[in-house]
Amino acid sequence: MVSSTTIVAGNLAWCVPLVVVLIYLTKRLATNKRFVACQVPLLSEDNLVDHRIDAAKREAEHGYLSCTVCGFENFTRSHHCAICGAKCFDTGEDDEDAVVHMLLSPSRELTPLQRRAREWARKLDLQGRLFWYRNAMDDNRHGSLFPGYTVRFREEPESVEVHEKELTEKSVAEINLREGNDSKETSIEIPAAQAETLETNKPGFDVSTLTYEVVDAAHTVFDDEGEAESSPDSTALDETRKHEVEISEKDFPAKFAHFVTSAAVLLVPASIKHLKLSVHRAYVLEESMELLSCIQVEHVRAAMRINFLEESGVDAGGLHREWLMLLNDMLFSPELGLFKCTSRQDQTYFINPTSQYDNGDDHLIYFYGTGRLVGRALLDGAVLHSNFCVPLLKLILGVPVGFSDLEYYDAQLYSNLVWMLENDNVEVLGLDFSVSEQVGDQVVVTELVPRGREIPVTDANKYEYLDRRFRHLIIDSVAPQLSVFLKGIYEVIPHQLLKLFDYEELNYLLCGTGEIDVDDWERHTRISMNLEDNKRVVKWFWEIVRAMSGEYRCRLLQFATGCSRVPIVGFKGLTSYDGRLCLFTLKGVAFENEGYIRSHACFNMLELPLYKTKKAMQTILDAILEDVVGFTTV
């Protein structure tokens, strides 16, 4: 018989190697990159970040980098200024020299646009009242000769009641209560009108009851509602208003974090209530504008879902971004005629004063819907890719507009009017206090003052003429459109929140930046486990992206996420739905179907086949991005 010693020795002979192998495999697993990657949180920061609020707050905590030219406080990740494009200085041995350069740089280094943004500032007087203070601008000698105007629109109380009643009675919204485990979820289904019989209704308020007042900002104080008040006995600002003024004086990252946090409080979570807008893709503009205008005010901040009728797909963020992109392109198209391009170079837009001729009486519905769309973009953290011109940005914020702002409305006209200021004997021009404008096939004459056609322009009254001409172009000729446009915005985003920013910051907030930092993109990208074992495929992808032009990078971003713009906080701020962060993801898939790359825009994901060569990947990407209009996302 075999002795017990022999049996023990035999067992040890195979147990010891087994233990060694298990120890080795355990060590390999603990150090395996794929295993470690599974343990990494969504954002590789000290704390778990799962909402854009957290991303904004963390950016604010990191401080800011000041532009050495214009002084704008950029996010610390920035290499170049988001406003003027100049290089931002980094922390290091050259910091002190950069700061000194910025502080001692003469104002002539700023562009006129940047200097103009500093012309007006909100201040508190000794009684705690808010007023506009006008800073001296050496290069704005023409503009300083004219007042700065603020515009306040009022709606008669009776009209407000009628508006609410009509919206309540409209049958476009079917509200159903769905019982959940712990709470009720309100689903507001807003179906599209039948495209063949689409008849847009007029707004639920009478525009004739909307009155406006143009006020000289230099002689005005504001009450606690933020409205103009001429009386010296105006109510002192409360602590909340003072706090808002303090916030407005902070750096941009801090203001942005405050804005995102405040906006998130306004947004009703989808778990409580959500809007579902169902539209036909072929009639997406007409139906979307009607539906946006018909949403009752109490529902306008609910989470929004988009449904393209007769198409498959559930909106988890991608369809909403695609819908927003489609509307953006259509609303600012010259064929529609709602907005006019004021600068081909900068692609900036202002309200088209002849929009009624191009779109009929329903043009006000479009402006009302556009206002709500802009408000929703701000509320949801989405970005547009059409820029408003300076006068319109100022009107949105309530910042005074003045004669010099005409330069950003019509540069040639502004140059002609400045010539009148600088030269005498303007009588030879044969002008009077009226303007002739082409509206379709007709020429319409508008008097700037009563009996204006009988008052010739002379050296004695040319200042009044230029002032009236400015007011007509920027305010009076677009007052109905402007009033409903602003009404739509403020119903979604309170005016007080927007007042934190100047107009350059608002433009940045609305449109983000078209510049794509590939390093930031790659740094905030997740890759699937099988790509960990095929690093060359990932390497090829980023090499191709770095070699792309800026336009093609934007197309790729649009293909992958449904939007061609980068979030304000960078790629770490990409979201899926309801503000939840969702990093860009590369998912490796088997090479089949000729290696076609598919996107899942709702999850910011590209399915990347495991290509054998870089050239094969390049060929497929080129084919996808060339078809800028035709590609679709899943």
Image: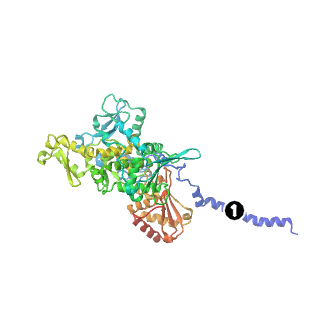
Residue pictured at 42% horizontal, 68% vertical:
623
Secondary structure category for the residue under label 1: helix
Against 478, is 545 above or below?
below
Quick one: quadrant of the N terminus?
Answer: bottom right
Q: Position of residue 172 (x, y in %)?
A: 43, 49
Q: Identify the image quadrant of residue 347.
A: bottom left
Against 537, is 506 above or below?
above
Identity of the residue furthest to the right in this view: 1
Q: Identify the image quadrant of residue 397.
A: top left
Q: Position of residue 88 (x, y in %)?
A: 39, 51
Question: Is 470 situated left or right of 251 in this image?
Answer: left
Identify which amino acid the numbered label 1 is placed on.
Leu
Q: Position of residue 509 (x, y in %)?
A: 39, 48
Q: Is residue 245 visible?
A: yes
> In this figure, which residue is indicated by the disc labeled 1?
22
Identity of the residue furthest to the front in this view: 197
| Crowding at mark 1 (Cα within 10 Å: few <14, some 14-19, many 20+) | few
Against 516, is 461 above or below?
above
